[in-house]
Amino acid sequence: MASTRRGELWHLDGPEREQRNALLRERETCDYSFVDWLYGATALLPEQEPPMFEPIPITSARKRTAPVGVL
């Protein structure tokens, strides 16, 4: 399921692609909170796990004013 969702995010085109890129640029480079549940070390039982992250709608991304590739 997680790989399907990542694939949906990765294979976007047009305005959705630009929104995805803007949203990901706003995140800290070392922020792995969206995949900690999958790759983070834990000694918890499944029923002890905290709830998963709150999804961020791709439409919430701010439009970029600089050309793509320019930071």
Image (cartoon, rainbow, N blue to C red):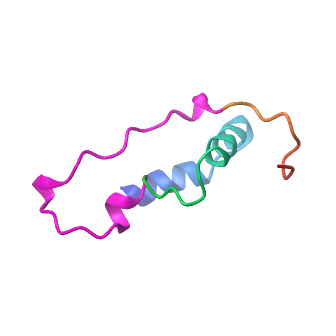
Numbered circles on residues, count? 0
Establish if 58 lies above or below 48.
above
Q: Quadrant of residue 64?
A: top right
In percent of the image, x 69 and y 43: which residue is there? 17
Kindly report the secondary structure that dominates the magenta region of the rendered protein.
loop
Q: Position of residue 7 (x, y in %)?
A: 52, 56
In percent of the image, x 14 and y 58: which residue is there? 46
Taking 14 as reference, is 35 left or right? Answer: left
Q: Position of residue 27 (x, y in %)?
A: 59, 48
In percent of the image, x 29 and y 70: which residue is there? 41
Taking 48 as reference, is 53 left or right? Answer: right
Q: Quadrant of residue 30?
A: bottom right
Q: Position of residue 11 (x, y in %)?
A: 62, 52
What are the residue bounds of the magenta stretch?
34-61
Q: Position of residue 15 (x, y in %)?
A: 72, 35
Q: Quadrant of the N terminus?
A: bottom left
Residue 57 lies in magenta, yes or no? yes
Residue 54 lies in magenta, yes or no? yes
Establish if 37 lies above or below 24.
below
